[in-house]
């Protein structure tokens, strides 16, 4: 199975979005794949007509990532308290390559 959008195109799978599942697990357990764009679409009435659209993804106000933001909002508004994890690391030390994003970590707690 391919690991990138280029592999999907090479297999003639246009109209797909590349995806990787199990990102909170070690890299050996990641599952690459493709999702048809049509699977992401809903039909909504817009300007009096039914249109296929990708549904909005709203912030989950009861989720752990937002709760962390709310708890630190005042501090973060006035200080340089930000995290920049840098680009995704595919090769190198485990502490760089196998680290998941802060949002994914918070969602899994």
Image (tube, rainbow, N blue to C red):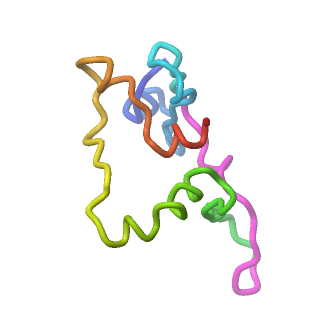
Across and down, in percent, residue 10 comes to: 40, 28
Across and down, in percent, residue 34 comes to: 55, 34
- In the image: residue 47, left or right of residue 11: right
Up/down of 68 relative to 24, above or below = below
- Residue 33, by quadrant, is top right
Up/down of 68 relative to 44, above or below = above
The single residue placed furthest to the bottom in the displayed view is 47
Query: Could you tell me which quadrant the C terminus lies in?
Result: top right
Up/down of 49 relative to 34, above or below = below
Across and down, in percent, residue 79 comes to: 29, 66
Identify which residue is drawn at 56% across, 29% down. 21
- In the image: residue 8, left or right of residue 95: right
Residue placed most toward the observer, 78 or 35: 78
Identify which residue is drawn at 39% across, 66% down. 75
In the image, is residue 107 part of the stretch drawn in magenta? no
Across and down, in percent, residue 103 comes to: 50, 46
Identify which residue is drawn at 37% across, 65% down. 76
Up/down of 35 relative to 7, above or below = below
Residue placed most toward the observer, 38 or 12: 38
Identify which residue is drawn at 43% across, 39% down. 101
Q: Tell me the chief SS of the magenta region.
A: strand
Residue placed most toward the observer, 57 or 86: 86
* Residue range corresponding to the magenta coloring: 33-49
Residue placed most toward the observer, 10 or 74: 74
């Amino acid at each position: 199975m391919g690991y990138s959008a280029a592999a999907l195109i090479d297999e003639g799978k246009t109209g797909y979005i590349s995806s990787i599942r199990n990102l909170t697990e070690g890299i050996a357990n990641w599952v690459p794949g493709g999702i048809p764009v049509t699977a992401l679409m809903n039909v909504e009435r817009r300007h009096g007509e039914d249109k296929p659209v990708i549904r909005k993804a709203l912030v989950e106000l009861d989720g752990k990532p937002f709760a962390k933001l709310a708890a630190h909002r005042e501090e973060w508004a006035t200080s340089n308290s930000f995290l920049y994890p840098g680009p995704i690391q595919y090769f190198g030390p485990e502490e760089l390559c196998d680290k998941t994003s802060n949002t994914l970590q918070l969602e899994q707690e």
